Image (spheres, grey):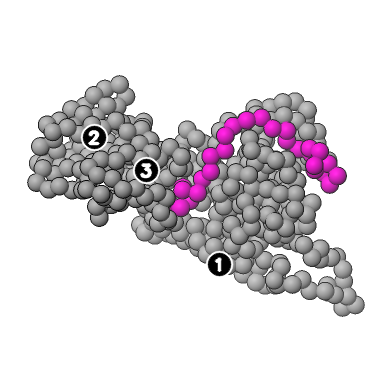
């Protein structure tokens, strides 16, 4: 077992040495439209801001540690957090290698250091133009408790840990030794390993595995041995923790931890350059940073292009003779007969009707998707990036569908055998 662990760390060390080469190879292959990358973005859950009591609240107090006290009020701004722990398939796609001890595409990545997680995030941000990050410790606990929907459970999503967590339910005694100095009872392989993300019940926000499976790195540093990062009774707003310390915070407990370590207020930590088969991570994202930079591109029939930087999708009105685009308080006008298409980088959104055909075309008005020039009794469908059908309607000539209730991400709209890719911002 020790030899296997040493070999794994040696491979990871060699990977770091080869990382410039691996990174070049990865970026040649992986793009922002890669479905695995898109799933990372699609699986971000919006957590409405609010105030909560952080630490050893009433349902936690019997098993709480000193570092969980005193309870104090924390106010957080709205943010997004990953529905699932980052999987090994996602890590492999971005980083080009898999350091995990227990391997499988849908298993959470583990055996990664805090520093390696930041390298993953850096590469992911370069690919997507977004600003992913690790959640702060306060954000993690707020989300684990269910945010504004919290039912004040002991674990993330339930008072019954078996409903929501993979943990050491056999209570194996790791200190117990036989006559030969070895553990007299071997742990069951069925129990002591990671499981595919999302197999247990989610919490109030639809987040999975925030208790158990793997512990999760947070962005905060801690220095509990020297009395730093111990809670105070003061109310705080959007706390970020220490800028440095002896360890980085780990939350949630793992498949090797017993119940008390899987509670929503339980705190632990480890050196940022250390790794464990019990520790992985999930992503966070600021609401203001959810969308990549956007450009409107108008392509004329002679092949020339006009480009306009945007902060949000404009209103588009396609008329018989003119295309009117309202953005940032300005109205841009283009002749319909001379315009081949309009699209947004990084995602194509709008195809302008070709005068010589009767193909459908699509426009975006805020959160509304408008399908134009449909045939009689046409079927219009919206799919998520994984191909799951979200909505289907029958319409003729024109139909308007809202994306307001769907998370930020990429969606596919199909109408009259025509396919459009839409970025919901």
- Mark 2 vs mark 3, foreground winner is 3
Give me the C-alpha separation between circle 1 and circle 2. 44 Å
Q: Which residue is mark 2?
A: 307
- At x 18%, y 48%, the residue is 359
Judging from the image, what secondary structure is the residue with disc 3 in?
A: strand
Q: Which mark is residue 104?
A: 1
Above or below: residue 246 compared with residue 181: above
* Sooner in the amino-acid sequence: mark 1 or mark 2: 1
Q: How many numbered marks appear?
A: 3
- Crowd around label 3: few <14 · some 14–19 · many ≥20 (10 Å): some
Q: Is residue 37 visible?
A: no
Residue located 35% across and 57% down the image: 28
Q: Is residue 202 left or right of residue 348?
A: right
Residue where numbered disc 3 is placed? 423
Furthest toward the right, the residue is: 179
Which of the image's four quarters has the N terminus? bottom right
């Amino acid at each position: 077992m020790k030899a296997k662990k040493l070999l794994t760390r040696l491979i990871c060390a060699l990977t770091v040495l080869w990382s410039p080469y691996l990174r070049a190879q990865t970026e040649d292959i992986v793009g922002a439209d890669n479905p695995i990358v898109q799933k990372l973005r699609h699986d971000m859950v919006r957590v409405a801001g609010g105030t909560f009591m952080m630490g050893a609240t009433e349902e936690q107090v019997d098993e709480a540690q000193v570092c969980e006290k005193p309870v104090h009020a924390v106010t957080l701004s709205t943010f997004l957090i990953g529905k699932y722990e980052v999987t090994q398939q996602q890590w492999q796609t971005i980083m080009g290698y898999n350091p995990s001890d227990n391997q499988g595409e849908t298993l959470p990545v583990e055996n990664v250091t805090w520093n390696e997680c930041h390298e993953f995030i850096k590469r992911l941000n370069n690919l997507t133009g977004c600003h992913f990050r690790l959640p702060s410790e306060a954000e993690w606990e707020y989300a684990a408790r269910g945010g504004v929907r919290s039912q004040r459970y002991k674990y993330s999503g339930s008072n019954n840990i078996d409903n929501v967590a993979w943990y050491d339910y056999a209570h194996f005694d790791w200190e117990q030794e036989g006559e030969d100095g070895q553990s007299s009872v071997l742990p069951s392989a069925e129990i002591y390993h990671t499981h595919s993300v999302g197999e247990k019940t989610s919490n109030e926000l639809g987040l999975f595995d925030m208790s158990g499976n793997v512990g999760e790195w947070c962005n905060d540093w801690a220095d509990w041995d020297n009395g730093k990062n111990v809670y105070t009774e003061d109310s705080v707003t959007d706390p970020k923790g220490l800028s440095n310390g002896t360890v980085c915070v780990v939350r949630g407990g793992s498949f090797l931890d017993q119940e008390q370590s899987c509670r929503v207020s339980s705190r632990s930590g480890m050196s940022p350059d250390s790794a464990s088969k019990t520790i992985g991570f999930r992503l966070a994202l600021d609401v203001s940073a959810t969308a990549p930079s956007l450009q409107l591109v108008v392509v004329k029939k002679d092949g020339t292009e006009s480009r306009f930087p945007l902060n949000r999708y404009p209103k588009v009105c396609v008329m018989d003779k003119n295309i009117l685009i309202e953005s940032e308080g300005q109205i841009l006008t283009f002749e319909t007969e001379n315009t081949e298409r309009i699209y947004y980088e990084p995602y194509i959104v709008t195809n302008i009707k070709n005068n010589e055909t009767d193909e459908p075309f699509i426009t975006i008005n805020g959160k509304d998707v408008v399908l134009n020039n449909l045939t009689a009794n046409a079927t219009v469908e919206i799919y998520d990036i994984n191909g799951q059908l979200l909505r289907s309607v029958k319409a003729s000539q024109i139909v308007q569908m809202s994306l307001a209730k769907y998370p930020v991400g990429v969606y596919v709209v199909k109408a009259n055998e025509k396919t459009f890719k839409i970025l919901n911002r």
